[in-house]
Image: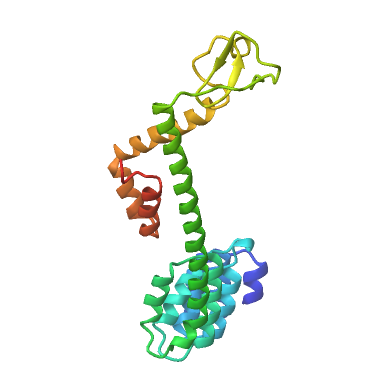
Amino acid sequence: LLLILHFGRYDAENALVVCHLHAFKQGVLFLYERMKMYRDVLKVYMDGNDCAGLIQAVMRLGDESYGGDSRLWVDVLEFFGKFDGDCSEQVKEVLAHIESRNLLPPIVVLQILSQNAHLTLSVVKDYMARILRDESAVIEEDKRAVEKYRRETANMQKELKELKTQARVFQNSKCSACSAPLELPAVHFLCMHSFHSRCLGENERECPICTPQNYTILDMRRSQRQSISEPDKFFTQLQHSGDGFAVVAEYFGRGLMNL
């Protein structure tokens, strides 16, 4: 029958019914996989408590590089979270794949596994140690970035104060556009760029070097204000996101909660 399924012409749904009627497991698995019903493939192994077969199946069907679905690893983890027995080695293998693909937040992983009374802390100890190490590295990197932005902000505030309270002395000897010696008529900007009047053309009100960056910042601020005026968009993202905390953190990071 398996050879007929592999080489013959048949209606997959009718063949699946026949295989179920005759309890032909190999045929059921073959047809489920042929029909890309990967979750049903896993369910066959789950119903039979076949942990070894389940791991082999998810390693094949959960490989995205071969057209699989990596989310199947989450289904397998939930199965082992409710499994009545010792499945420590299988859980470790599943955790390795979930970690490498970043499929679930660690808190969700722990909540799922906490349902299994047979699992001990040693099963997740290495997983949590790696997660905490990576999180600590991210935190340190964020701290360095925050300190850098604080210094830049302080320098900007100092420069802004000087612009308001002190005279600005322009000592540029070359045009910032053509690099030729600066000659009159010349135009000096507070950003300390200087140009020949002829190099600026008709626009003598904006520094051509700094204007693109200034417009980028203005567009970002305009986009932020637009996002604030559309609160439904934020709640929609929050509702459909797998990690609501990441959405909130992104909005805080973009300054949208402070406008």
Residue name at image x 45 percent, y 67 percent: 104
Question: From where the camera sits, is residue 14 visible?
Answer: no
Residue 193: where, in percent of width, then height? 57, 24
Is 180 drawn above or below residue 256 in the view shown? above
Question: From where the camera sits, is residue 171 visible?
Answer: yes
Residue 24: where, in percent of width, then height? 54, 81
Count of marks, rendered view = 0
Depth order, front residue of 123/64: 123
Depth order, front residue of 151/80: 151
Colour option used: rainbow
Point out the image quarter for the C terminus.
top left
Residue name at image x 58 percent, y 25 percent: 209
Depth order, front residue of 178/99: 178
Point out the image quarter for the N terminus.
bottom right
Q: Is residue 219 left or right of residue 173?
A: left
Residue 189: where, in percent of width, then height? 52, 21
Residue name at image x 44 percent, y 48 percent: 150
Is 62 drawn above or below residue 129 in the view shown? above
Residue 26, quarter of the rendered image: bottom right
Is 156 drawn above or below residue 182 in the view shown? below
Residue 201: where, in percent of width, then height? 59, 10
Instruction: Give the residue at the far right of this rendering.
Output: 180
Residue name at image x 43 percent, y 91 percent: 85
Depth order, front residue of 208/172: 172
